[in-house]
Image (cartoon, grey):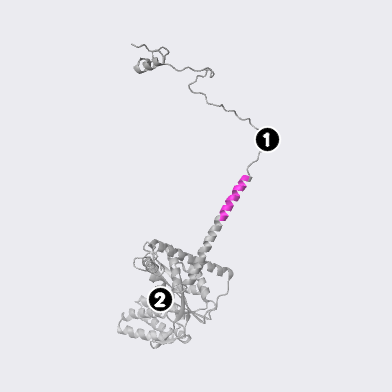
Amino acid sequence: MGSSTPFEEAVESLADTLRVHVSEPTARRQTQKWGAAYVGVQEEEVKRIEQELPLAPIGPDKMLLSVDGAMVPLVGGEWAEVKTVVLGKIDEPVWESEEWKVHASELTYFSRLMEAEDFDRAALGETHRRGVETAAQVVAVTDGAVWEQGFIDYHREDAARVLDFAHAAGYVAQAGNAVWGDGTATTKEWLSKQLHTLKHEGPADVLSELRTLAQDHPELPTLNESLAYLEKREAQMQYPVCLVQGWPMGSGAIESGNKVVVEARLRGAGMHWARSNVNPMVALRNALCSDRWTEACAQILTHQHLQKLQMRQLRRERHLAEQTTAHATTATLPCTPLAELTVQPPVSQPDSLPDARASDASDSTTPREPWRPGPDHPWRHSPIGKARYRSRSHAPLAKN
């Protein structure tokens, strides 16, 4: 629930459906804990593939590979890009809205907040599981970003690369708007003709038209920008080949993936994420949106159990090491030969402590008489003291 809805709503849903009451911090902490465990599971899978080089499962005849990024808000007002790759099986073309369209099914997602080079390696587990390297044909539809081409090179260098038709159309429209104005009838008519040519005849005539406009209007730098972008990606705009081969020409799968997987949960009103919490959350979102939640839960529980066993083993090894060190220290203490040992006679102790009031010169065997005050002592002149003194004398008091 925490991976599908905000934590406040997850707590309410848990109480309504299961009658289980937890606090929002508990829901947040447990969700992030499970997400971090799933990230660990996928990282271990990447290491296993790199070390063992297992054979990949057999992929489909036509596979879609599309990659893109979506921005998410971080704590402190910063924004960062979460990269996502979507993999799926390309279905047969269908006739929709008076044209042939190609869709993909069995879509799965992998997302991470990291640099492009690290993302290439981190996605190895997902691409291996889906059989990207063994698929008969892989079609990579992207928006033409440089880092996306590097991702394709890493996982399937021979993939057929297609520039998203909507992106190409946007740059063509940008050139027309610069010359005839945004939204004018002339622009619309010119743009419709150019896009039809681009889709059914290829980019050659469209690029030639843009070069002519750039020469006729040197004062418009937008024309040169649009022309440079499209010329660099001419090989990815072979849309007539896509129509013949039954390849998709749009990146709708990855764009919807950005919205459903990333933005729907991480770009809510008032949300700001700590950078360390983004990957655990998107990992759970990948499992949820790829219909692999049951499989992911089993892997997470196994991972957590193994972690507990490892921690217990580490504590046991640390305890044994401390005991071994203590025994080694005792064994290395210097030992005195038995012949050198001497026995000291015990020191006798007095039976009783001397009286502090006794004189050093007095004989302890002489009996001591009761102490009596002197003749001039003030006690003798007090009525009470005189009476007590007389009562102790041997002569009785005379009666008057």
Residue for point 33% across, 84% down: 188
Which quadrant of the figure has residue 349? Answer: top right
Q: Which mark is residue 340?
A: 1
Q: Position of residue 332 (x, y in %)?
A: 63, 45
Mark 1 burial class by Cα count in 10 Å: few <14, some 14-19, many 20+: few
In this view, the residue farthest toward the left is: 184
Q: What amino acid type should be assigned to the residue bearing mark 2? A: Ser
Q: Distance between the residues labelled 2 and 1?
A: 90 Å
In magenta, the rendered stretch is 316-330
Which residue is nearer to you in this view: 69 or 193? 69
Task: Specify the quadrant that holds the C terminus.
Answer: top left
Is 234 colored magenta in this rendering?
A: no
Q: What amino acid type should be assigned to the residue bearing mark 1? A: Glu
Q: Is residue 357 above or below residue 51?
A: above
- Is residue 6 left or right of 91 when viewed as pictured? left
Mark 2 burial class by Cα count in 10 Å: few <14, some 14-19, many 20+: few
In this view, the residue farthest toward the front is: 399
